[in-house]
Each structure stands twice: as C-alpha cells, then as structure tokens.
Image: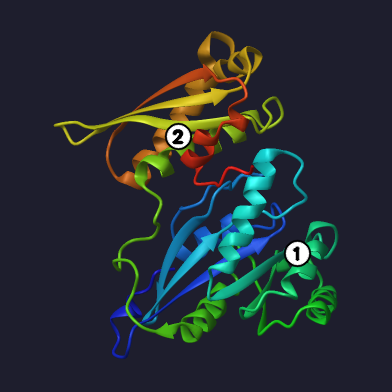
Amino acid sequence: MNDESANAEGPTRSGFVALIGAPNAGKSTLLNQLVGSKVSIVTHKVQTTRAIVRGIATHKRSQIVFMDTPGIFKPRRRLDEAMVTTAWGGAKDADTIALLIDAERGIRGDVETILERLENVRQPKILILNKIDQVKREDLLALAAKATEKVRFERVFMISALNGSGCTDLLDYLADAAQEGPWYYPEDQISDLPMRQLAAEITREKVFLRLHQELPYSSHVETEGWKEKKDGSVRIDQVIYVERDSQKKIVLGKKGETIRAIGQAAREELAEIMEQKVHLFLFVKVRENWINDPERYREMGLEFPR
C-alpha cells in the first residue's frame, strides 16, 4: 500500500510499529498487505516468522516501519525462547504496539498471556481484530470489549489481512500518529531484509508448504552463494540444513522430486520479486543439533538464549 500521495506538501513523518500476537494470528499476511509486497513469509504452519522482519509502508507523508515479530507463545525449546524474547524486544523498541488477534479464535491461551503482559508496557497500543469476514458483528464487538477491559488501547481496528478490508483506515491512523521527522529509508524501499536473507526465507517457506507434516521445525536455509551474471541473471546457491539423515531423505524425495519442486517454486517467486532470471541450486546437509548452535541464531537474527 505504498501510495503516491507521499509527494504531497507538508512535513514528513516516521514511526516504528511492532506487530505482535499469538502464532498464526495473520501478522505476516497483514505486513505484506500494508507494505503492498511480499516481505514476510506466510504459511499455515505456526511460528514461521523467526526473527523480526521490517516492512516499510509510505502513506500520505509518513513512513511507517512495521516490525513483524515472531508469534508469542509459551516456549518449550531453546529456539522457541529466542523467538519469544525477540518478539518482546521488538515491541519494546517500537513507537506503537499493534496487537493482532484472530477474531475466529478469540481470546484464549497465548492471547490472554500477551494481554496480561501488555498492561505493563508503556507505549501507545492499538488493537487489530483480523478475519472479520469470518465472524458475526456482535461477536466482534464482544471480543473488542473483552480485550479493552484488560488493556487500554488507543483505537480498535477491524480488518481482513487477506483481502485488505479496513487496512487503509489502519494506515491513515498510523500515518497521522507518526512523529514529524525525516524518513529512515529511501522512498522505494519496502524492507530492511537483505536480498540474500529474503531469498533464504522464501525457500524456507516452500520447504514448509511442501513438507509441513513430515518435517518438524528443525530445518533452516542459508544462502551461501550469490553471483550476478553478465546476461543479467543471477545464480543463487542455498543449503537446507536438517538435523538427521532421515530428514534429508524427506527433503530430497524420491529420485529428487521433492527438492526439485521446492526449488522450482522458490525460483519462480524469486524471479518475480527480483525481476530477473534466477538460477537456483539447492543442497541439503545434515547438521546435527544446529538448534543449539549460537552461530545459526546469529544467522537468523536471533539472540542465543543462555
């Protein structure tokens, strides 16, 4: 939703907004909708976002930097702990905190925990109810009332992240709430994620979409080679890391069919985003216990929990 009215007269404004919520509330879908392009990976598998992804929307004369944080949930493993710590760290650094709640699922479990913790957070907070097209209006109003009893929200927005309903009102509010000051990024920039990292995230999304039942969370993608060619195309070499040989066989598939399908889907999307021909080469390596390796956490933009 980066719009042309950015060239209108008046002072420039800028601000950081942290999108927080339970896993699968729709934060990544909303971020992509607000920015108007894909900057965060979206799958039906919970906890897909691992580190903070910043998406940049230019609306009116304001530049709004959205921080898509990992879903907040009760940590069970070291990786979980790192993701939750990162999410709350992102919230602490923002000018405004936007809590996104899946209106179909309502307030329970992880959402209740988030509301309890938000009571003590000093920044202005807004509430966003997502998937309003799936829920009756009276149920939405009851849900909003229940949430605002627990936490003081400046405003409540009812939206559909998938089709964009209500998102312009949300952008209008955030643009007006931003502080006067210079923009942090060039006007045409939509993310602070380096292209190498975004390419790895896109391949990781395709791995999840293809293997969400067979493969647990212990897979990780790194871009190890990036070469611009004279004909204007680019060669990208990536490694999919798994923890066991049995997982490697799953990713490769029978006669390499699965990894070919993953590679084709990733290559097509990368070519569309980058607007150039992409030669993508995928390799699968076993790295036992990578989930406890501090170096991998740095690569993902997460702090290693001690």
> Type of residue at label 1?
Ile
Residue at 56% from the left image edge and 62% from the top image edge: 90
Q: Secondary structure at mark 2?
A: helix
Which of the pair 269/200 is nearer the observer? 200
Labels 1 and 2: the sequence-earlier one: 1
Q: Which mark is residue 156?
A: none
- Can you name the residue that lies furthest to the front here? 306
Residue 80 sits in which quadrant? Answer: top right
Residue 118 sits in which quadrant? Answer: bottom right
> Is residue 46 shown to the viewer in this render?
no
Residue 127 sits in which quadrant? Answer: bottom right
Q: Are marks 1 and 2 in contact (CB under 8 Å)?
A: no
Residue at 49% from the left image edge and 46% from the top image edge: 301
Q: Position of residue 221 (x, y in %)?
A: 49, 32
Q: Position of residue 271 (x, y in %)?
A: 34, 39
Residue under label 2: 266
Q: Secondary structure at mark 1?
A: helix
Q: Position of residue 11 (x, y in %)?
A: 32, 88
> Type of residue at label 2?
Ala
Q: CA distance from mark 1 to mark 2?
A: 34 Å
Q: Nearer the viewer, mark 1 or mark 2?
A: 1
Q: Is residue 227 above or below residue 148?
A: above
- Can you name the residue that lies furthest to the top here? 255
Which of the pair 129/197 is nearer the observer? 197
Residue at 74% from the left image edge and 52% from the top image edge: 73
Q: Left or right of 138: which side holds 45?
A: left
Q: Is residue 193 above or below residue 172?
A: above
Q: Which mark is residue 114?
A: 1
Q: Position of residue 40 (x, y in %)?
A: 51, 51
Mark 2 Cα shell of 10 Å, populated few (<14), some (14-19), many (≥20): many
Residue at 81% from the left image edge and 79% from the top image edge: 141
Q: Which quadrant, please, contains the C terminus? A: top right
